[in-house]
Image: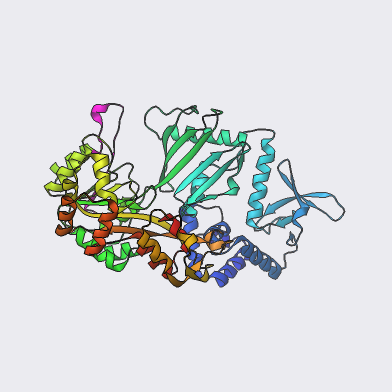
């Protein structure tokens, strides 16, 4: 268990840990310790803050209390931050007579030294380290006090999905995508020279992991790259995009992909409930997964959780079924003996290529019962293979980029040239989803919810009837606290929930679709009339009533 070695250093740290446990509880402390070990974070104080369990300010107060109780006179606790300066990488404290005394900035002290020590809060200590590094950079432009792996480790602690490194005219800035929000991480701020050097370091690292002709000096055209950190249990899929103006700077986006197996429950109802699906809809979804042949399409925009929904279904299917996936890349390793996952293979020799269509054809001969195709693409032979297999005795799951489940027939027709009478009989269920930020349960503010004409005037995706439904809506609910709290990284949001629409066609419904040339809105109205579907607006209003999301999110549905 973390910190056993550290706790034995001196009575001070043991006292501090005891105070932390008294403040947050043993369960939360043990959880933070596990997170620290998983991400190899630098210190438990940082982990507690990042998880929203104990803010830096609160930790600092506990540190000071501990020192006062122990009577440690060798450490300066109370001081004016303006009296601390950094010069040529060293830290100095201003004494009463105006002179500068070199000190060791620390966020928890060791008692085996005679040096003058100053107790700094952890974030202040980190800022001094960064300031020190930037000052040194004025002499040498390539000194950076952290690695790309350090950034990845921090991103894992924050449960970020992506890392973005953006070059600007004066600095390179690092952002994390957390719960869909684009948040800057100030501790990784770099000046331009640092940023250019850091960008090249990442390209050098990527060249060791990327197959093919990856060029570490290329800053004029886009490149794809990979990096794997086996000790962290993750891989990264990187996109390097040149600015096209200076031809020196590169915008870097890194998608974090878990390399460890994910233990997803065999209880489909529980899995989908955690994702945010309603009980009555889950019953309908489960009935579809018991079918032996046909196509289930989960659609939505980029990063809307489409694959995550399917990952929460596959491990809960009958274990006597052979399940195969083909993905690019494999982003989630499923821990089930009957699930075999396959990665697209694209070597330089075209004759050796294994793409989606080759895998689908092989799955037929391989006697698979259920197949997950990571993305339905405009790829030669893929659509024909999907149609053939869905009609030949395989249950196929796939994802597609469209905005509504009710657009599925027109989208398939326009993108893949499949006639509506074919797609109407092929699709077992069309589900479309997006992810909306959940209000932070620790700081959300209760309020009355209603919608005015101004609120609905520009909601062009809604019908007149749906706008009228909004205008008549009234309920108790919650809104975001603008300054947030430490638990939600001061955003007011924590986590995301799924908002969705879907329909499950019946034979009568299919006959109507085949007989008439229906628009997506007409298909939606028909599905609601038959009671075989649900709209995003209906789900959204349920979540507002439950206090999970705020009304302003209506603009996103």
Where residue 470 appears, as percent x and y from the top left, is 41, 65
Q: Splitting the image into 4 quarters, where does residue 288 fall?
A: bottom left
Q: Residue at x 46, y 52 (%)?
A: 180
Q: Looking at the picture, does residue 445 appear above or below residue 196?
A: below
Q: Is residue 458 visible?
A: yes
Q: Which segment did they paint magenta?
A: 337-356
Quadrant of the image for the C terminus? Answer: bottom left
Going by the picture, which residue comes out furthest to the right? 97
Where residue 54 appears, as percent x and y from the top left, is 57, 64
Closer to the camera in the image, 472 or 270: 472
User: Is residue 274 shown left or right of residue 144?
Assistant: left
User: Is residue 215 shown left or right of residue 104?
Assistant: left
Q: Is 312 included in the stretch rendered in magenta?
A: no
Q: Looking at the picture, does residue 411 appear above or below residue 543?
A: above
Q: Residue at x 66, y 67 (%)?
A: 66
Q: Residue at x 47, y 34 (%)?
A: 241
Q: Looking at the picture, does residue 514 appear above or below residue 226?
A: below
Q: Is 348 included in the stretch rendered in magenta?
A: yes
Closer to the camera in the image, 251 or 439: 439
User: Is residue 537 shown left or right of residue 507?
Assistant: right
Where residue 514 appears, as percent x and y from the top left, is 16, 50
Q: Looking at the picture, does residue 451 appear above or below residue 202?
A: below
Task: Tell me how the rendering is colored.
Answer: rainbow
């Amino acid at each position: 268990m973390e910190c056993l070695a550290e706790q034995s250093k001196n009575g001070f740290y043991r006292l501090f840990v005891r105070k932390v446990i008294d403040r947050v509880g043993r369960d939360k402390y043990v959880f933070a310790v596990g997170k620290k070990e998983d991400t190899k974070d630098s210190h438990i104080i940082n982990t507690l803050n990042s998880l929203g369990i104990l803010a830096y300010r609160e930790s600092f107060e506990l540190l000071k209390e501990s020192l006062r109780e122990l009577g440690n006179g060798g450490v300066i606790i109370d001081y004016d931050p303006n009296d601390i300066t950094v010069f040529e990488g060293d830290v100095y404290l201003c004494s009463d007579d105006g002179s500068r005394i070199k000190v060791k900035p620390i966020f928890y002290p060791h008692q085996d030294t005679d040096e003058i020590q100053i107790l700094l809060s952890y974030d202040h200590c980190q800022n001094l380290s960064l300031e020190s590094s930037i000052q040194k950079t004025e002499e040498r432009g390539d000194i950076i006090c952290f690695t790309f792996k350090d950034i990845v480790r921090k991103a894992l602690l924050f449960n970020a999905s992506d890392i973005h490194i953006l070059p600007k005219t004066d600095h390179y800035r690092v952002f994390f995508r957390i719960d869909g929000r684009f948040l800057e991480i100030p501790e990784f701020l770099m000046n331009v020279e640092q940023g250019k050097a850091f960008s090249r370091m990442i390209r050098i690292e990527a060249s060791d992991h990327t197959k093919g002709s990856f060029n570490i000096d290329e800053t004029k055209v886009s490149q794809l790259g990979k990096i794997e950190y086996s000790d962290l249990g993750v891989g990264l899929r990187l996109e390097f995009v040149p600015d096209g103006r200076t031809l020196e700077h590169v915008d870097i986006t890194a998608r974090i992909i878990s390399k460890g197996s994910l233990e997803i429950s065999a209880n489909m109802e529980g899995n989908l409930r955690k994702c945010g699906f309603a009980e009555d809809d889950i019953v309908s979804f489960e009935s579809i997964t018991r079918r032996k042949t046909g196509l289930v399409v989960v659609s939505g925009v980029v990063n809307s959780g489409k694959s995550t929904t399917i990952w929460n279904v596959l491990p809960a299917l009958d274990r006597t079924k052979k399940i195969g996936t083909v993905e690019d890349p494999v982003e989630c390793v499923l821990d089930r003996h009957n699930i075999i996952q396959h990665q697209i293979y694209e070597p330089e020799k075209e004759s050796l290529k294994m793409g989606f269509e080759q895998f689908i054809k092989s799955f037929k001969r391989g006697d698979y019962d259920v197949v997950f195709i990571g993305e339905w693409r405009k790829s030669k032979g893929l659509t024909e293979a999907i149609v053939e297999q869905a009609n030949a005795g395989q249950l196929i799951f796939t994802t597609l980029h469209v905005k509504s489940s009710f657009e599925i027939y027109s989208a398939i027709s326009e993108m893949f040239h499949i006639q509506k009478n074919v797609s109407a009989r092929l699709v077992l269920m069309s589900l479309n989803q997006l992810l909306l930020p959940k209000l932070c349960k620790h700081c959300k503010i209760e309020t009355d919810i209603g919608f005015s004409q101004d609120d609905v005037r520009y909601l062009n995706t809604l019908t007149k009837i749906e706008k009228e439904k909004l205008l008549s809506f009234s309920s108790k609910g919650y809104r975001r606290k603008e300054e947030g709290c430490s638990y939600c990284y001061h955003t007011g949001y924590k986590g995301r929930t799924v908002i969705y629409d879907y329909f499950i066609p019946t034979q009568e419904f299919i006959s109507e679709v085949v007989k008439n040339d229906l628009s997506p809105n007409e298909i939606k109205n028909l599905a609601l009339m038959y009671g075989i579907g649900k709209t995003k607006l209906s789900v959204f209003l349920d979540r507002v009533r439950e206090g999970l999301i705020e009304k302003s999110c209506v603009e996103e549905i």
